[in-house]
Amino acid sequence: MPAVRLAARVAAAVAVAAVAAVQPPAQPLTADQRLVAALPAAVTAPAPGYDRDLFGAWADLDGDGCDSRQAVLLRTLEEQVTAPDRPTECTIVLSGTLQDPYTGTRAAVAASHVDIDHRVALRDAWESGASTWTEEWRRDFANDEDNLLPTLPGVNRSKGARGPDQWAPGGGKAAECAYAAGYAHTKARWELGVTDAQRAALIRLLNGC
């Protein structure tokens, strides 16, 4: 796990003020909202030098023979059609049924037509702390399966590198809750910061979850 390479963690008073702007004081914060309030503050100016290649390619970090893309497809696609088994090698998913986590759309898909989205986008990670990481840390982040979701290509391209202050799922409240909670936990796990706008958006999305 990378050490904190950001500006100092946001002061408690600032966090409370940010929460108060979107959360009525009489309504207690949920555990996920408290997590959001405690996230470190990210520098608002974009960090220069981002390049997707700095995060490496899909990798097999756990040594099971499947890179992270294949592992996500195996875990999430239903009604799978797979290539013939190859002893000691990864099972290759050819097609299946995708329940898109952002829109709720259910569709039969070829595996090659499924995008694997980084819930916390790589550019977002770069601008909130990953620019100071080693190559190995960035590779591990890019292959963190808890931050990877299979999506329809159009949905993934619509989201792009935008964070919760600029984009939210269109699949209803359950999709918003899952996205905001997953985003916050990824940022906390990797000790990445959030901007004031991202913090406020996360608190709002988590209202009622």
Image: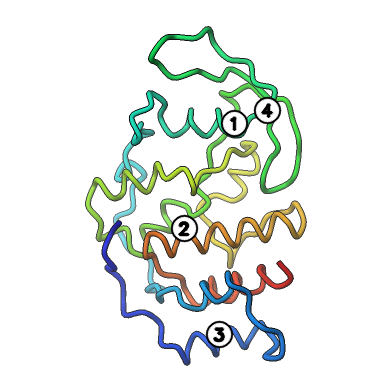
Q: Earlier in the sequence, mark 2 or mark 4?
A: 4
In the image, 54 versus 94, the foreground residue is 94
What is the secondary structure assignment of the residue under circle 2? helix
Disc 4 marks which residue?
A: 78
Does 91 sit left or right of 205 as displayed? Answer: left
Disc 3 marks a residue whose amino acid type is Ala
Q: For the residues labelled 1 and 3, say whether their Cβ atoms are less than 8 Å apart.
A: no
Say which label, 1 or 3, has the lower sequence index. 3
- Image quarter of residue 12: bottom left
Q: Residue at x 40, y 16 (%)?
A: 89
Q: Position of residue 30 (x, y in %)?
A: 63, 74
Q: Which mark is residue 114?
A: 1
Q: CA distance from mark 1 to mark 3?
A: 37 Å
Q: Position of residue 120 (x, y in %)?
A: 49, 55
Q: Earlier in the sequence, mark 4 or mark 1?
A: 4
Q: Which residue is mark 3?
A: 18
Count of number-bearing discs: 4
Contact between marks 4 and 3 (CB within 8 A): the answer is no
Q: Mark 2, residues whose alpha carbon is within 10 Å: few (<14), some, or many (≥20)?
A: some
Which residue does the numbered mark 2 point to in the structure image? 186
Q: Amino acid at mark 1?
A: Val
Classify mark 4: helix, strand or loop.
strand
Mark 1 surroundings: few (<14), some (14-19) or many (≥20) residues within 10 A? many
Question: Where does residue 157 sit, x and y in percent of width and height?
Answer: 58, 44
Residue 124, by quadrant, is bottom left
